[in-house]
Amino acid sequence: MSAPTQSAFHGVDIPDADVIANCMHCGLCLPHCPTYALTGLEKSSPRGRIRLIKAVAEGEMAMTEGFVDEMNFCLDCQACETACPAGVQYGSLVESARAQIFESEHESTLSRVVKKVVLRWVFIDHRRLKALARVLRLYQNSGLQRFVQKTGLLKFIWPRLHDIQPLAPRVSKQFSSDQLAETMKPEGKPRFRVGLLTGCLMDVAFADVNVDTAKLLLQQGCEVVVPKTQGCCGSLQAHNGDRSTAREMARTLIGVFDAEKVDFIVMNSAGCGAFMKEYGHLFDDDDPLADRAKAVCAKVKDITEFLTETGIRPLEVPARPNSPFEGKRVTYHDACHLVHSQKISRQPRELLRSIPGIEFIELPESTWCCGSAGIYNIVRYDDSMKLLQRKIEKIKSIRPDIIVTGNPGCLIQIQHGLAMEGLEVELLHTASFLRMAYEG
């Protein structure tokens, strides 16, 4: 096999002609690709997009509107990587293509606004994010949101905003960064010193999950460190093409956690965890931060990964009569960046099955994307809803009482689907489920 051709897309290697030829004959990724399932078109499959990326990178094809559309149509769920016998790193390819698109501004107005204003202006400054979250909280709690939804005013002003408004998460009553102490110590001698990423969306909209994660870690005998100077990890920016902003956000976060001298950095957001584990690839070897970046990303663990792989087990689970989940049918949805990017699937299931009194049932197509995919459900709303409907149909087929998952985007998306169908199914983050189960 000849050496790979060096890509024009930010130094990422494009598979050579032999690899692409093998992809054409293989096709094992096709049944696992949600967008190919929607269209049946080769160009909307992983191998089709690789050919497009190669053609643009080598100057055989211009960066057309169709090329841009295909790169953004991709969910970057990376299910194809799990299926690929050759180990082609498709996710890196499509994200590098998006970076080239972002810099050349070959995108729709909505995409540019969302990516440049929301991802670059709002999320890069945590104080600004919290200020805007307070405004949104006022809108949600004042009754104005209910009035707008009931009257359908947005249908006439901005129909697309009317569609996506229900996908806005409920802002927490109190942000986790304002609730959690910077250092929390367990009873007795700590077994580990653990850093906790409060994040951006997790901090302002899923504060309860961050608090539950901290309590869970304290239960495990960990000293929990929550640096007040931390901010967003940069994953949303990187996955949507803004690599330079993502790199600067990573640079800041590396400095924060490196200074804390923690044993592990525990994550409760699949997308954040997947990206932080890639910090070592963000910086060239001659960058002064390269070694520190590799050291930090080596400490990153998803909460379920941490609980199962460090040898720590939950404290004694309450007797069955005290369990809030006694007799409940519980299922688990695999977040894409947990199961495909981080290869974490066994660990959460082991922990759920360890809870007495529940009936654990597998969700059909549990690894199939729900359609959230970062900001995908905003910029590709119609495609996102088609994928969500498929997920909801699988949920209806097993009639669970509780759905557990490990990513905020999945929680928002699936909750929206349950509400549209009028399904009374409880939806919980894995950390919250485990905290409630262990405390009784």
Image (tube, rainbow, N blue to C red):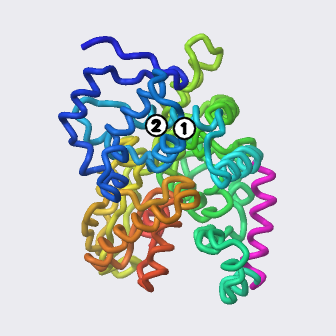
The residue at which mark 1 appears reads as 98
Which secondary structure lies at badge 2? helix
Q: Position of residue 415 (x, y in %)?
A: 49, 72
Q: Quadrant of residue 213?
A: bottom right
Say if the magenta span includes residue 383: no
Kind of residue at badge 2? Val
Question: Is 194 drawn above or below residue 117 in the view shown?
Answer: above
Residue appearing at x 55%, y 58% in the figure: 215
Identify the residue at the far left of this view.
Answer: 25
Residue appearing at x 59%, y 73% in the figure: 163
Q: Position of residue 258 (x, y in %)?
A: 63, 29
Residue appearing at x 24%, y 51% in the figure: 31
- Decide which of 119, 317 is in the foreground and name it: 119
- Estimate the spatial distance between the alpha carbons at disc 1 and disc 2, rounded to whole Å: 6 Å
User: Which quadrant is the N terminus positioned in?
Assistant: top left
Q: Residues within 10 Å of mark 2 (few under 14, many from 20)?
A: many
Residue stretch in magenta: 126-143
Main secondary structure type of the part rendered in magenta = helix
Q: Position of residue 353 (x, y in %)?
A: 28, 63
Q: Is 4 placed left or right of 187 in the picture?
A: left
The residue at which mark 2 appears reads as 94
Which secondary structure lies at badge 1? helix
Question: Which label was assigned to residue 79?
Answer: none
Q: Would residue 308 be seen by someone viewing this image from the given angle?
A: no
- Decide which of 179, 275 is in the foreground and name it: 275
